[in-house]
Every structure is written in structure tokens, then in C-alpha cells.
């Protein structure tokens, strides 16, 4: 935190630690989240950020993000303030697998997509919703939690442990 504060300053910046985000959901056990591998716990934390109510839309960035140019709000939001959806059919991944004769790449991706689609009762084409960075909307996360996961006795920890990709369940 001190590195971020020293680098960014504190003017207009809110610094939060993982615990502050996780404890915003009373159904989550902080010790259970902390016991997860780092790749899983960070997805849970990103999936729970909306509960803080800090922003209607927020940019989700992974630690390996690299920006090749300056960006602004209009790169991520319509003039009305609605986030653009990043959605694709993973054609580059499919091409990569095909060129290297690794058919399991497309097969595994499709199986993962189908499993998630089956949970939601969705049929049709297989989509990916990334790569990061993407803008997430807290109402989408809220609906997913309140109207889908909670009625099934689940939370984001349960969902991400089952399908370890916050990009697929969001």
C-alpha cells in the first residue's frame, strides 16, 4: 500500500486492501478466501468489489496489464456512461491451437463455456468476455449475486471455485 500511496499520491484515490473488500460480503469467510490459491482469491476480491458502492462502473485490471497508450473514459464508456462490452469468440486462441495442432485448446475452451452456459440455461455461441482490462457494472454483479447465486445458496467464492474465471461468470 505504501508503494501505491507514494507513487500515486492520495488526491482522488481510494486505497483498499483485500480484507476491506471481502468483509463487505457477510456471507464470505475471510479465512476461507485467504486460504485459496492467489489466482482464486484475487478473482473473488474482484468479484466482490461492487458491494462497496464506490462506483457504478469500474475498470478491472490485472497486475500484468500493460498500457500501450494513454486512455480516457470514452475508451471504456459510451457518452451516456454505459460500459462497452468486450466480447469475442476466441478466434486468436483457436488459431493458435490449430496452427500448433493442439485441438484440445479449442475443445477445452468450448467445454468450459458449455458448462457455464448450462448453469445459466443459455444456448448459442460460445463467447469470452475479455481480455482485461474491462469495465464492470455493479448492477450486473448485484443481479448475479442476488438473483442467481444467493437463491442457490452460493456466493462468488463457490462460483469461482467451481469455474475459476471471473471473466466467464460476470
Image (spheres, rainbow, N blue to C red):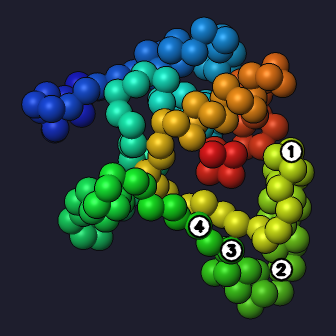
Q: Which mark's residue is nearer the viewer, 2 or 4?
A: 4
Depth check, front residue: 148 or 89: 148
- Mark 2 is surrounded, within 10 Å at the Cα level, by few (under 14), some (14 to 19) or many (20 or more) other residues, namely few
The image quarter containing residue 99 is bottom right
The residue wearing badge 2 is 102
User: Which residue is tagged 3?
Assistant: 89
Residue annotated with mark 4: 87
Query: Mark 4 to mark 1: distance in Å?
Result: 19 Å
Q: For marks 2 and 1, give the one nearer the viewer.
A: 1
| Chain-order first, disc 3 or disc 1 | 3
Q: Give the image quarter of residue 73.
A: bottom left
For the N terminus, the image quarter is top left
Residue at left offset 67%, top offset 74%: 90
Q: Which residue is mark 1?
A: 119
For the residues marked 2 and 1, what is the alpha-carbon distance in whole angstroms? Answer: 27 Å
Q: Earlier in the sequence, mark 2 or mark 1?
A: 2
Percent of width and height locating residue 119: 86, 45
Helix, strand or loop status at disc 4: loop
As drawn, the label of residue 79 is none
Answer yes or no: is residue 142 visible: yes
Amino acid at each position: 500500500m505504501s508503494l501505491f500511496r507514494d507513487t500515486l499520491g492520495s488526491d482522488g484515490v481510494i486505497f483498499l486492501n483485500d480484507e476491506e473488500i471481502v468483509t463487505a460480503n457477510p456471507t464470505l469467510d475471510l479465512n476461507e478466501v485467504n486460504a485459496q490459491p492467489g489466482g482464486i482469491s484475487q478473482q473473488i476480491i474482484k468479484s466482490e468489489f461492487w458491494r462497496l458502492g464506490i462506483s457504478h462502473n469500474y475498470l478491472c485490471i490485472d497486475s500484468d496489464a500493460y498500457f500501450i497508450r494513454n486512455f480516457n473514459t470514452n475508451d471504456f464508456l459510451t457518452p451516456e456512461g454505459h460500459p462497452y462490452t468486450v466480447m469475442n469468440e476466441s478466434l486468436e486462441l483457436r488459431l493458435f491451437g490449430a496452427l500448433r495442432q493442439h485441438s484440445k485448446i479449442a475443445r477445452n475452451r468450448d467445454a468450459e463455456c458449455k458448462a457455464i452456459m448450462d448453469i445459466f440455461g443459455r444456448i448459442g455461441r460460445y463467447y469470452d468476455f475479455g481480455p482485461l482490462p474491462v469495465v464492470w457494472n455493479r448492477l450486473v454483479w448485484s443481479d448475479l449475486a442476488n438473483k442467481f447465486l444467493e437463491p442457490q445458496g452460493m456466493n462468488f467464492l463457490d462460483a469461482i471455485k467451481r469455474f475459476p474465471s471471473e471473466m466467464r461468470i460476470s
